[in-house]
Structure formats: C-alpha cells, structure tokens
Amino acid sequence: MADIIQLLPDNIANQIAAGEVIQRPASAVKELLENAVDAGATEIKLIITDAGKNLLQVIDNGKGMSETDARMAFERHATSKISAIEDLFRIKTMGFRGEALASIAAVAQVELKTRRNEDELGTYIEIENSVVLKQEPCAYPIGTSISMKNLFFSVPARRNFLKSNAAEMRHIIDEFIRVAMAFPHIFFSLTSNGQQVFHLEAGNLKQRIVQILGNGYSAKLVSVKEEMDYMNVYGFVGKPETAKKTRGDQYFFVNNRFIKSSYLNHAINTAFNEMIARDSFPSYVLFIDLDPSVVDINVHPTKQEIKFEDEKIVYAFVQAAVKHALAQFSIAPSLDFTLNADIQSLDAISKPFTNNEQDNAASSNLFKTFTLRNQAHAIEPTNKNELKSWKEFFSPSQESINKEQAASGDDFFEYEKPFQSLVNSNQQLETHTSSYTIQHCLQLHNTYIIAATQNGFVLVHQQLAHERILYEKYSVAAHGTQMATQKSMFPVSLELVPRDAALLQEILPELQMIGYLIEPFGNNTFVIQGTPADVLQGNEKHSLELLIEQFKHFSSDIKFSKREKLVRCMARQQAIKSGQPLQQQEMMALVEEIFTCNTPNVTPTGSPTYVEFKEDYLDRMFQRL
Ligand code: ADP
Ligand code: MG
C-alpha cells in the first residue's frame, strides 16, 4: 500500500490558518487598521462596501514598504516586528505574529499599493488564494493602501456563515471604534457604501471620546490619571448620570490594545459603588500602560483577554484611580442615595408639575387606553387568523409556560388569581368586567396600588404590572399580525452615533412588526414615520433611543430571539414608571388589565407584579381566626 500522508499545499494550509485570524470582515478591519497604526500613519481611512463582504480597503500615510517587503509581507510568519522570542516581552506594536496579511491573501482577492519616502516608485501587488497574480512598479503617494475584495470568495462555506450586512457592519464599527479610540492623535475616517460614517479629526482623548460616543458626554467626563512606577492609569470615566443599562460604553485598553476583562470591570464598578443604580453600568474609557514584560499578550489573535503577571496590583490600582478621580470631582455628595437613577431622572421628579402638564398627562394615550373600555387591546381581531392568535395568547402553549416558569422560578401556574370572576372568563373577554368591578384604588408612594378584592386586597406594583400587560400585548403582535401603527403627523428625524445606527438598521424589520415605521435616511439618520399606536407621539425620539439602549443590554443574551428581546424592551420601556402619580381610572384599568393577563403575577424577567393579602391571612394576623 502506498503511503498516505502528504504535506498540504501552501494555499490550503494558509486558508486553514486564516480561519483563526480572519473570521469576518471586522477581523480584517482590526488587522489592517493596526498595521497602519504600526506603520506610523497620521491619517487612516477605511472604505467598505457591503459591510466588507465586497470591498474593504485601508489607506494610510505611514512609512510604506520596499518592493521586497511588500512581497514578503504576504508570507506566513513574515513580520518586521519581532525577530526573537524575547522581543515578545518588549512589544510596542499592535501586530507581531506576521499572520494577518498572509491570512487575508488566503481568503480574498487582495491589492496592495505602497511606497516609501526614499523610493521614487511604489509597488503594486495583486494576490489571490495566496498566489501572486501581478507585481509591478507604480506611482503612489507615501504610504500604503490594501484592498480586500470578495472575502471568502474561494471558501463559500465560510462566506455563507457571514451575517447580514447590518450585523457585519456593527462588528466593523466596533473594531473601528476600538482602534480609533486608542489613537486619538491619528485621523480616522470610515466610509461605507459611499457615505462617510466617521470623520474623526486628530485631537486629544476627550475630543475623540465625544466624537465617537456623542456630544452627550462632553460635559460629563471625569478625568482619571494616576502614575506609579509599575503602571499608569489614565482616561475618563463618565459621571454617574451617564451610567447605562447596558455595558455599551465601556472601553479598556492595555498598552493601547482593547481588552475585555470582567475582573477589571469589576474594579471600576466597585469604585462607583453607591453612586449608580445596582443594575446599571458606568461608562468609561480607560487606559493602562505597563511594562510589556509583565503582560502576556500572546493569546489567541482574535481573543481580547489578557494575562497580567500580578492581577491584584492592577485591580487595586485601577479601582483606587477611579475612586480618587470621582472623589476629586466631588460627585458623590451631590447624589441622593435613597433614590435610584431611574426615578431621579423622571420628569415628574426633576420638574415642577404644572397645570399644563397635568392636562397633558390626562390626555396622553396611556390615559386613554385606560379610560376607554377595551382600548388597551389596541388590535381588535378582525379576521379569523388574527382571532386565532388572539385565542392562543389566552391559552399559552406549554412551551411558553415552561419558559416563563423557568424565568420566574416559581410555580405560578398554580397561583390563584384574586379576581376569580375576571380570569375564569378568559375566553369571553368582552364580558370579563361584568361580574366583579373594582370599586376603588389607592396609590401609595406613587408606586403601589392597593385594590380591594372579593376576599382581601392586592398590592400591585404599577411599573412591573404594566410591564407584564404590555409584554403580553406586544407578544401577540410580534407573533401574529403586525401591530397598529399611527402615522406621525410630523415625522421626526433621529440622528444616532454610528454604532447605534448600525444596530437600529439591524432591527428595523422587527420594529416594524411592533408598529414602528422607520426609514433610513443615510448618514446615521433615520426618519420616524410612524409609531406603535400606544407610544405617545412627540416622545418617539426619546422612546427609540431608550429602546436601542435597552436592546443593547439584551444583545449578548443569545437565549432570546431578536423579536423576543425587542418585545421585552418595548414593554419595559413603555411601562408607566414608579413615581408616576396615577388617576383613579388609570389605576382601576391597570388592576383590571393585569388580572386578564396569562401570567399576571410576574414580569417577563420574573419579578413579582403584585402581592395578594387574603382575608383569612389578615384575620390570622389580627388573631381573629
Ligand atoms: P504583523 O503586523 O504581525 O507583523 P502582518 O501580516 O499584519 O503581520 O504584516 C506583515 C508585515 O507587513 C508587517 O510586519 C509590516 O512590516 C508590513 N506591513 C503590513 N501593513 C503595513 C502598512 N500598512 N504599512 C507598512 N508596512 C506594513
Ligand atoms: Mg499586523
């Protein structure tokens, strides 16, 4: 029998190796931008079409390459950045593995143009499947341009694994931001399908943060700067009011390399301690510089973890630096610790309540849904199909029951519903209020509603209960027919930071299902043409911004579909908040509504929505039984 082992041809070996480095267009963005930074460029432009699936080009004004180097650069393990293993411990460049260009050339069609200052003519190279197709001298300004076309054209299986353009674009923007944030003295731009998404003039770190994260931050950054022999920490943390419900605006760099570290993140969170609500995340852009010999960056190329020689020192120092910065700006004393940030930011608390506002509140859509009978069920079943999903909604599938049970952690299905007469008539909604009417409600602390039941009373949490009501309503819409849209009389435009724009683009179809009509208008701008029937108009911009914010919070949670995430976000966002005074009719409607829900007693995430006090329990309490 013949021997069967053979060496893989170079191009196949390269293709396999490339899988480690280039997983998607965004990986190429990272590698090419880092190469440009390493080449000492002061201007770096990224141009893409079709989220990098079609074209991804980086143009820099760095030092360029000689003719031989230009050719060598595409060999595997070809690098100018290290020559001996010890060099790994004094690395000052972003790259060092010498794998990026070889990988890109293995899985795409690549064109390189480059010229050094000392050369009269530059070099042009065309390479595909690791094979050089053309190499010739060319006229070119000082610097380098690398274009990568038709990523994975020769590996269709991989190409099929790429996500939608919107999703890939979001990854690209993330990588772009991570590099651009770390090098504020370099000009960066990003052009996508002919439109400029970022134009970041060279400046200082604070300017760069505001350019990227938005003007909202300009007056809200606290400088962090501590130096010691072992390491330096510098950068900015957002004042407590910039804390988000998402981890979105958290950037940590070690020696200018973006890293993810839940350990260091914890250090910062604890430095903020009581200043922000427990479920929110501080914003920060922080840099640690330390001797390369005490960090191990030699991890997987696409991973962002890092190993420190002494983690504890780094942790303690980062925490102390942030605490010190916050204390210096004496932010702490101005906060009222008894109120959480959500409540503090409510208009109801921060602004005086005028007659005018009172009228507005009374005429708001929310109020109407509560006062007009059956209005809360905005979609009236009009045809058989809708009717069907409507029915299903009231007799949940076993699967959804299991899911909810898992989420709530208790046996809610056994739970006795206090308004028996209401909930027993699930099938005949129209008559549900006839047998028992709530007489009167009492609001406590603008948060709780007390309502007498046939044999006791319920204590309802207004925000959590309303979240459950809306959740069930939106779920029906999302799984059946599209929800009713109210056309905006005065369409509002919404300009987002590029990262959020990419996200919004990605969820547009789902938003439409729940009643939003939004059109992209180019340049990170969208026009809101319509909103779900019960979103208060005039407020749609803010609602959407909030929605995006919350969606980001969920976006790492793979257990839910996009649609489910949105429904949950919408419900949470549109729910009346704690702290909001309610009219008698509003309270009564809310209490009625919650007990017509499938799962009245918990929110989608499992918090209780009400507590019931029964007569016999009360009697026992007062030793009457
Ligand atoms: P690494 O960055 O790890 O060295 P790469 O494959 O990314 O490996 O690049 C190989 C080499 O090509 C680099 O070491 C560098 O010398 C050269 N090179 C790559 N990109 C550029 C660029 N934009 N300008 C100048 N030289 C570059
Ligand atoms: Mg590199």
Image: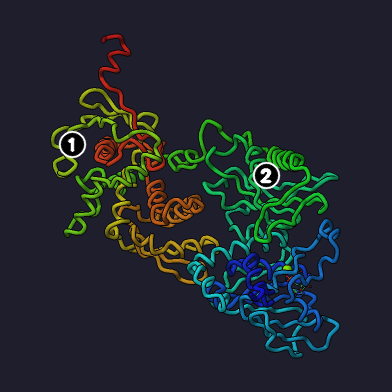
* Residue placed under numbered mark 1 in the picture: 424
Note whether 512 is above or below 360 in the view shown.
Answer: below
Q: Which quarter of the rendered picture does the N terminus lie within? A: bottom right
Q: Residue 341's spot in the image, x, y percent?
A: 52, 40
**Front position in the image: 367 or 103:** 103
Q: Residue 530's spot in the image, x, y percent?
A: 34, 62
Residue type, numbered disc 1: Asn
Note whether 146 is above or below 290 in the view shown.
Answer: below
**Front position in the image: 180 or 366:** 180
Note whether 418 is above or below 243 in the view shown.
Answer: above
Q: Residue 110's spot in the image, x, y percent?
A: 65, 80
* Residue placed under numbered mark 2 in the picture: 264
Residue type, numbered disc 2: Leu
Q: Which quarter of the rendered picture does the C terminus lie within? A: top left
As drawn, the residue found furthest toward the front would be 1
Position of residue 192 in the picture relative to residue 316 (left or right)? left
Earlier residue among tags 1 and 2: 2
